[in-house]
Image: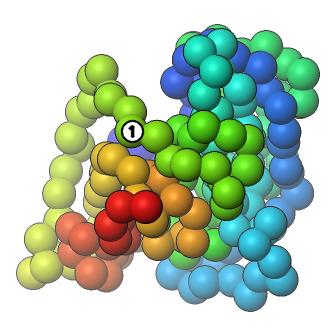
Amino acid sequence: DLGLDEAVYPVADGTVISVQDGAPENIPFTLPQLRSPAEYGGNQIMVRLDSGEFAFYAHFQPGSVRVQPGDRVATGDILGLLGNTGNSDAPHLHFQLSDGPDVFTSASLPFAIDEWTLTGTVSDEESTATTAVVVNLGTGTASDGLGGTDILAANEGVAGGAGNAGFTGSN
């Protein structure tokens, strides 16, 4: 069951280059009033992978981030807990692989997922389901204003059916 409080792991070994923590948890299904683009990711982590790319993870729970800049991370380490911070109206992980450390100026890079499990779907007719997981894979512009991929995990009703995570194209 993917949702609030789930651990988030690094996609590969690397070094943490930036961390932002302290953004409050949002009220579900209500977009917050943000003051600047720096707040879009809420509680967030940027890791420079040993391969040279940059992995960005956003929307962690307040106080759950377990790493600091300069820390070495490996697959299997816990970065923090899935949350609903920043430009987010439901708990989800925003993940972006890019060619630079600035998510607004670097290019999003394609990536492959070795293994995944579909835990459920929601049709438009079932948009009031109590549990939904929608995964959008690829590069593009996500509904939270950041390029990359959103993985939506909601434990309450989800409006909008299977397209809810908001993958809207390529950049």
Q: Residue at x 55, y 70 (%)?
A: 144
Q: Nearer the viewer, residue 58 or 53?
A: 53
Q: Quadrant of residue 158?
A: bottom left
**Which part of the image, by quadrant, shows the N terminus?**
top left
Q: How many marks?
A: 1
- Dot 1 crowding, Cα within 10 Å, few <14, some 14–19, many 20+: some
| Horizontal relation, residue 152 to residue 101: left or right | left
- Kindly identify which residue carries mark 1: 110
Q: Nearer the viewer, residue 169 or 84?
A: 169
Q: Nearer the viewer, residue 89 or 163?
A: 163
Q: Residue at x 90, y 22 (%)?
A: 70
| Horizontal relation, residue 85 to residue 66: left or right | left
Please state the horizontal and vertical placement of residue 147, each as a whole percent of the image: 52, 59
**Which part of the image, by quadrant, shows the C terminus?**
bottom left
Q: Can residue 129 be seen here? A: no
Please state the horizontal and vertical placement of residue 15, each as a whole percent of the image: 77, 20
| Horizontal relation, residue 117 to residue 146: left or right | left
Which element type, helix, strand or loop, lies under badge 1?
loop
The relative height of residue 34 versus residue 144 in the rendered view (above or below) is: below
Q: Nearer the viewer, residue 9 or 158?
A: 9
Please state the horizontal and vertical placement of residue 128, each as a whole percent of the image: 25, 79
Q: Can residue 1 be seen here? A: yes
Q: Quadrant of residue 154?
A: bottom left
Q: Residue at x 38, y 33 (%)?
A: 111
The relative height of residue 99 versus residue 112 in the rendered view (above or below) is: below
Q: Quadrant of residue 28?
A: bottom right
Tell me the kind of residue under disc 1: Pro
- What scheme was used to colour the molecule? rainbow
Please state the horizontal and vertical placement of residue 82, each as a whole percent of the image: 59, 47
| Horizontal relation, residue 40 to residue 112: left or right | right
The relative height of residue 82 versus residue 158 in the rendered view (above or below) is: above
